[in-house]
Amino acid sequence: MKRKFSYSMDPPKILVSGFIFVIFLGAYLLTLPVATKDGEGHSFLNALFTSTSATCVTGLVVVDTGTTFTTFGQLVILSLIQIGGLGFMTFATLFAFLIRKRISLKERLILQEAFNYVTIEGVVRMVKRVVLFTFVCEVVGGILLAIRFSFDMSIGKAAYYGFFHAISNFNNAGFDLMGEYRSLTGYVEDPLVVLVICSLIIIGGIGFVVINEVYEYRQTKRVSLHTKLVLLTTSILVGGGTILIFLLEFHNPKTLEPLSWSGKFLGSLFQAVTARTAGSNTLNIPDLANTTLFLIVFLMFIGASPGSTGGGIKTTTFATLVGAMLSQIKGKEEVVFFKRRMDHKLIYKSLTVILSSLSVVIIVTMILTVTEPGKEFLMILFEATSAFATTGLSMGLTPDLSPVGKVIIIMTMFTGRLGPLTLAIALTLNRRPDPFRYAEEKIMIG
Amino acid sequence: MKRKFSYSMDPPKILVSGFIFVIFLGAYLLTLPVATKDGEGHSFLNALFTSTSATCVTGLVVVDTGTTFTTFGQLVILSLIQIGGLGFMTFATLFAFLIRKRISLKERLILQEAFNYVTIEGVVRMVKRVVLFTFVCEVVGGILLAIRFSFDMSIGKAAYYGFFHAISNFNNAGFDLMGEYRSLTGYVEDPLVVLVICSLIIIGGIGFVVINEVYEYRQTKRVSLHTKLVLLTTSILVGGGTILIFLLEFHNPKTLEPLSWSGKFLGSLFQAVTARTAGSNTLNIPDLANTTLFLIVFLMFIGASPGSTGGGIKTTTFATLVGAMLSQIKGKEEVVFFKRRMDHKLIYKSLTVILSSLSVVIIVTMILTVTEPGKEFLMILFEATSAFATTGLSMGLTPDLSPVGKVIIIMTMFTGRLGPLTLAIALTLNRRPDPFRYAEEKIMIG
Ligand SMILES: [K+]
Ligand SMILES: [K+]
């Protein structure tokens, strides 16, 4: 099986080279005079930053999207978001699908012949479903938002704004057209905008494997461990995040205090949801308390679910690690969730994902404390985590970044978007045992 | 074996209750009027803080040790340091020794009879060795420091200062008598003081198991994996830390810039060494660049080696995790160091130690950002890590802590000192398999 695919599909290479091509194409388009309102085009470094941020669905911006770019420039950004988000989700879904097929012993042994059929037919069907699903979500969200926006602006502009923000948020991209880096702060108490966008973010960030399973549930009557873990972890993080933000910001005169009770709830919910790496915001991020900001750093680092438009180490990775820790503390040999045992390899994979992610965030933070002297540490940690987890929330550092700082953040966004997945792919494909086994020896730990 | 010991030795309980008893006794003695120079005794909360800090060999102080306490008070603190440091090291060594015996299948099968003999005789011999070794190091260090200090003060005071600082630093306690929270900043360019104290810190923090092995090497001609990993990791962290601090602080006019080349080197070395949870300092910590401070947070978190007077997650834990990560990235099934394979259980134990430690530091940091409003985030993260890793370095937050903040730090120091070890003990003693095995199921990671 492996040999058959190896000439035509080397997944990490396709993904990496495809992304690089799209990013540079986008950067080129944004340097054209027609892209910016001042008629001069974007500088190359800023164009590369914006293009990377859009393609990696991050949302960190060195200039304000609404006031800097022409409609052409904005549509370039929107296309990059759609290509980046959909491309990544499709690719990840397909990969999960192929991998699942490959390791299914039953199919290998019994349905060997059918395997090729399944991969080819299955691939086509799956791609169709992902595209259709994305289209439906974005259209429904776009219409709802357009209706709401039409009370504040002309119908044409409302439609444009509705679809732009629906696409941006479904793809967890965090770009907005509101101007002056305002994001959605004007709609903090608006239930329709908050709930529609929260829904788009969550659905976009939950992963197509989960969506597909829910869709097929009527026939299969089966919920996988993966889906259970994703739903459980997402609920805990969103629920816990909302409650904590509500409590921490309740008396903050710059954020929740002036709002009504429902406004306070919607504001807390939105900020908890956007931390699953969406990047829009309805409260002004630098006004939040340090505790809240650190909580958001934590939530951003965990991020969304595998095979979605979101980033971070992923909910399942986090759940696996917490499960492994609790099992150990209880003295159990195995990690068990919902009466299902987890393979040791998955725990190692989670360990690798969290350690490599922590290393990137720590190293990037250290470098930025050198390149951006005088900036508050939390601001730098926040920005580094936001870039790595492709969240796009910012305490305001990005527009002030030094050129070296911009290059660092560009590389961080790219690593963050590709890192965990390509790593997971590499780990899955190239795994091979040592030629022989060394003798074991114990050491003292902790 | 287990049954025989269970009535007389339940290690975590002995350790925890013994520590609590010593801490409260010390706190009581420090509240006596004879303990402080103002003749009023320490307030109970401050006395509890100081006693916990001394017994847990941390070194965080709410008041300056040299100027606040009488000689009686200082000797109480010194006794707590010696009891805490030696008690912990002895206990950890014995435990490692007993555990090693217990799991040695060869001895269980062949030398069943000899086992009791080994545990009883071996325990006595090991305790004697630990005590003797500690005594020799402290006396040699004390004499060398006293000679140096005698140039600056009377012979009697120099002897007292010499032994106080030798004991404090061998036990990685970080208390000093220099006054005004100065620590050893007056000796930043002094090769004798720097090198003697660095040696005491490193020897005290390397773990008696390693020392014992070096001592026995002439007969055994064997170096264990444990010792190799400890020596390798310690060298890399001290060497790398020194180089990075040298580069980062080279042009800092408040730290290294005014010093000679050798002074710059000694200053960098000392700060890199003290971060293996000793807590003395020769550069003024708040004057360091943010990058250096974050680097020190990282080094403190890793800390010293198992079964030593130092804290942190420990060098072997860090090495195991890095090894596991690199093996995974290379697609290997096993973690191999120096041609020795590591058991999966050790990797899980390391995972548990790092995750539980990270959780404590993150939670304590979050709570302190609430209880200490307006304080810089990095200062709080630094203090939380320092307390957890029982390092005792401070950017200056401790003396300004609110009463709630003090209680939090007291609990953190206690947890940090006992946490990883008791956890490791609990994991080793109470491990039992699940009654039955659940079916395995895969999920997507990363
Ligand atoms: K984003
Ligand atoms: K210490």
Image: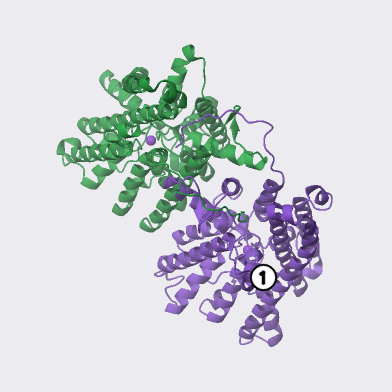
Chain colours: A green, B purple
> In this rendering, does residue B107 appear at all?
yes
- B332 to the left or right of A76: right
Q: A186 above or below A299?
A: above
Ligand 2: which quarter? bottom right
Q: Position of residue A363 (x, y in %)?
A: 42, 53
Task: Where is residue A154? Give x, y as percent.
Answer: 28, 20
The answer to whether the residue bearing label 1 lies less than 8 angstroms from the nearest atom of ligand 2 is no
The residue lying furthest to the right in this view is B7
Q: Is residue B199 left or right of residue A5?
A: right
At 47% from the left and 18% from the top, the residue drawn is A214
Q: Residue furthest front?
A: B110
From this viewpoint, which residue is outermost toward the top? A218
Q: Position of residue B332 (x, y in %)?
A: 45, 46
Q: Could you tell me if residue B30 is visible in this image? A: no
Please state the horizontal and vertical placement of residue A279, each as a whole percent of the image: 40, 35
| Mark 1 neighbour class, 10 Å CA radius: few under 14, some 14 to 19, many 20 or more | many
Describe residue B118's horizontal placement relative to residue B256 as left or right. Answer: right
Q: Amino acid at mark 1?
A: Ser
